[in-house]
Image: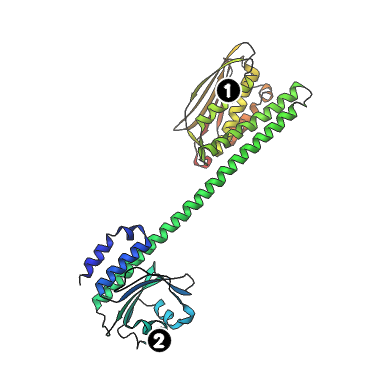
Amino acid sequence: MNYIGIIESLTKSSAIRHGDLDVAIHEILVKAAEGLQVARVNVWTIDPKFTALTCIGSIEKGLEGFSKGQLLPVELYPNYFKHISGAEKIVSDDAVSASFNKELLDSYILPLGIQSMMDIPVRIEGEMVGLVCFEHVGEKRLWTISEQSFAISIAQMLSLCMETHRRNELHHQLEIALHEKEVLLNEINHRVKNNMMIICSLINLQKYKAKDEFHEGLLDEVRSKILSMAYIHEQLYTSKNYAQIDFGVYLENLLSHLNGSMGVGMHVNIDKNIQHVPIAIKKAIPFGLITNEVVTNAFKYAFKPGKPGILNVRFEKNNTGFHLAFKDNGPGFDSKNEKRNSIGLGLVEDLVEQLEGQIAFDTSNGTLVEIHIPDQSSLA
């Protein structure tokens, strides 16, 4: 018999390569039975606690089909289990007389008329995960060395198939877990955004209880800051990317909102030169707050009702990091006096420092705020 040819044909099986367990086991058992000319071949798996063998595939000469499901508990066959657990192979030329088979005689060997057997443990990375059994009926049979080698090769093919199947199942479980995590993160971002919008609504209601315009303005500023963070969570759950956002998209949406909410009665043209760059959530929130603060200050102090205003906004990334710049055509201010704190640039400086960046001001012709943030892995 050409055992090498049989093994080579099995290596070409797509079912074995892809871990299609039932189909692969059936193919292997059919080839094994044909090669050894035995009455039955069956495959068993053993549970991790080594308590029982479960048949996952069996074929019998003269019978069509593929059966499985039989169970052999360890407690009924303790000596047999102990013998197979440390063996490379168990060869029984005379299955009835072999001492290690005594526990199987009345329940298995004699009822099936088995005269000779080969039991080969199936192992994955040295761990016994199952057993393949070759059963001969009729006269006793002396198993040759080549037949024993062929049987071991069959066990190795089963090991490959079972390992691939196990890996596929693990991959599937990981996919399910990942999907569940994505759903959870999506729900969290959605709820965070909704909660922030509720807070904004509450602040808006409280605003109408303010006694003067100054306190109304303070509430508007708080509401604007919260909205800038809410939009980030909105973009996270709509884009399905929970680690980073397209900051260019976010920036354009935030600028549009600020222009619509603060530019009432003004004629402000926002000239945007914005690069679409993915940015980590750890950076996105402070970047958003910085943008909110600088643009809000521009609308409050640089632009006057009825007078055309221009705000240039530039965002880009290069080899040195992220660059964010704002330039208005307002009257400018003295960046060295106390007015800086009064218009909120202290918060901007704190946020830039938090990101380990640098900020520069130029008030000679309007106000220019330039911010550079290094692209460090620690900030990703």
Number of numbered discs overlaid on the protein picture:
2
Looking at numbered disc 1 in the image, what kind of residue is underneath it?
Answer: Phe
Left-right relation of 358 to 140: right
Mark before the other along the chain sequence, 1 or 2: 2
Quadrant (top left/top right/bottom left/bottom right) for the N terminus: bottom left
Residue lying farthest to the left in this orientation: 1
User: Could you give the CA–CA distance between mark 1 and mark 2, rounded to whole angstroms?
Assistant: 92 Å
Looking at numbered disc 2 in the image, what kind of residue is underneath it?
Answer: Lys
Q: Is residue 100 above or below residue 222?
A: below
Q: Position of residue 221 (x, y in %)?
A: 67, 27
What secondary structure is marked by label 1?
A: strand
- Nearer to us in this view, 190 or 374: 190
Q: Position of residue 239 (x, y in %)?
A: 51, 37
Residue lying farthest to the right in this orientation: 211
- Nearer to us in this view, 242 or 364: 242
Q: Nearer the viewer, mark 1 or mark 2?
A: 2
- Confirm or deny contact between disc 1 and disc 2 (CB under 8 A): no
In the rendered image, which residue does mark 2 sit on?
102
Residue lying farthest to the top in this orientation: 306
Residue 333 visible to an observer of this rendering? no
What secondary structure is marked by label 2?
A: helix
Q: Is residue 182 above or below residue 224?
A: below
The quadrant holding residue 65 is bottom left
Left-right relation of 301 to 65: right
In the rendered image, which residue does mark 1 sit on?
361
- The colouring scheme, among rainbow, by chain, secondary structure or one colour, is rainbow
